[in-house]
Image: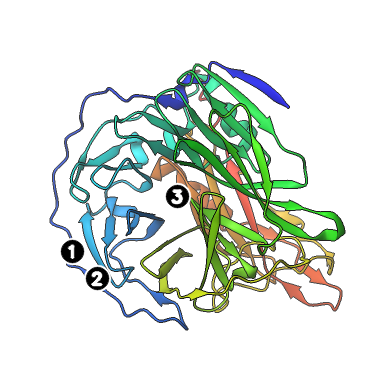
Amino acid sequence: MMRTMRRFSSLLLLLALPLVAQAKTVPPPPVHATLSASAWTAIPLPAEVLGVSAHNGLLWAYGKDEMIALSADGGSTWYIRHWRPHGEWIFPMAFADPDHAYAFGTGLHSWRSLNGGDFQPWRKTSFGVWSAAINSKEKMLLLGVSDVEAPQRLFAVKAAAHPRSAALLDAKHAAFLLNAHTIAATVDGGQNWQTLTLPAAQRLLSITAQKGQYVAYGEASLKGKQQAPFFKTSTDGQSWTTQIASSLPPLYSCTGTACQGTKGKGWIRFRGTASAAYFSQPTNVLYHRAWAYSNQSVCFLDVHLHCGLSLPQPMPGPASSVSAPAPTAARSKAPHLKPRGEVVKAAGCISCPPPPSEGLIDSIRVEYIVGPHGDVTKEILDFASFKQDAKAVLRTIATWRYHPTLLQNGRAIGIYKTATINYVARHDP
């Protein structure tokens, strides 16, 4: 079913604000790591990594202290291309071509590189950016939230909480995933938006722009509890064609044109909808934050950045599968997650005081782990535009307490949970 979203043009814009100047800091020396096909290698970058991406055969890692790191050899050597101690937090990045790269961060700041690696402060955005797509003419599709004076811009946040995957065909045609079952698209440069809502049996994972058309990847539940990948394609975002790929294994998290498959044993790289290739990876891991691949290697982001060698393998067959399990970090670090159908007592909150929201400038999303004893053992900031707001929210969530989650055999387990804190307008006295 299609419905129109009007006055949502603020997500698609050509930034035209004054450039922002900042002092340049000499970056740290390159970081070297030895990668393996049998074990993950932690990459000791000088600042905490908040995101990882791949473009044109290169790997990019970015995060706190305005760090942008680049690897041209599949993750073995990382060059710090931008870094400012105690600076902003960078997340996400977008790429127009091999030379033009863009980064967005806290404080509404952005950075641009015109030569594929040297970043300079660029322009201020009007809202915190969660996801971005850009073309060679610097026409952008930015997803995020705005200030309280423009409530129509909050539609994506209220409807999807965390829109991420975005695709831009040209200056007039753009689309993004509003949630796991809805695609939003525009044909007039963002003046009007239409949504396509998929059946509950279809779950969207990623959307990209490839050779003049949108390609959305997802997973469909078939008869007999079997799951199979599907592709949706469109040249305008209005009319869509669906193709079920029942010969492929089930998909999990996707990044661009690649998806996790076979419960974390490997991943699948797609070329449009016509062909696919399968690659192994060190140990089983389902990425719950971000991951990227390049040059027969793969990197994922947990609390730290990990990379490993990734080798071509025969494509596994389809599986009459269970539903995609909750995403986990590496087995050595993640608590046991609840198996489907075995939980007899869920984690009910005992004490969960609300984080401060009065006067927040943006929304904040946090992923956290409730340990077997009901305490919050680890909290991971997923997105926040303003560091001072994020610190207060993390401090509060770290104090939350839950009843233990119990299995049928009486075993207490840890589980992943998420929380999104939306801002509340500050009222003048």
- Of residues 201 and 272, the one nearer the viewer is 272
- Of residues 28 and 220, the one nearer the viewer is 220
Q: Is residue 384 above or below residue 55?
A: above
- Give the residue type that dot 2 points to: Val
Alpha carbons under labels 3 and 2: distance apart: 28 Å
Residue, disc 3 = 391
Alpha carbons under labels 1 and 3: distance apart: 26 Å
Q: In which quarter of the image is residue 94?
A: top left
Residue, disc 2 = 31
Residue, disc 1 = 28
Give residue 394's position: percent from left, percent from top. 51, 52
Do the residues under discs 2 and 1 have CB atoms within 8 angstroms? yes
Quick check: can you spot residue 213? yes
In the image, what residue occupies the spot 19% across and 41% down? 114
Give residue 136's position: percent from left, percent from top. 30, 34
Give residue 273's position: percent from left, percent from top. 56, 50
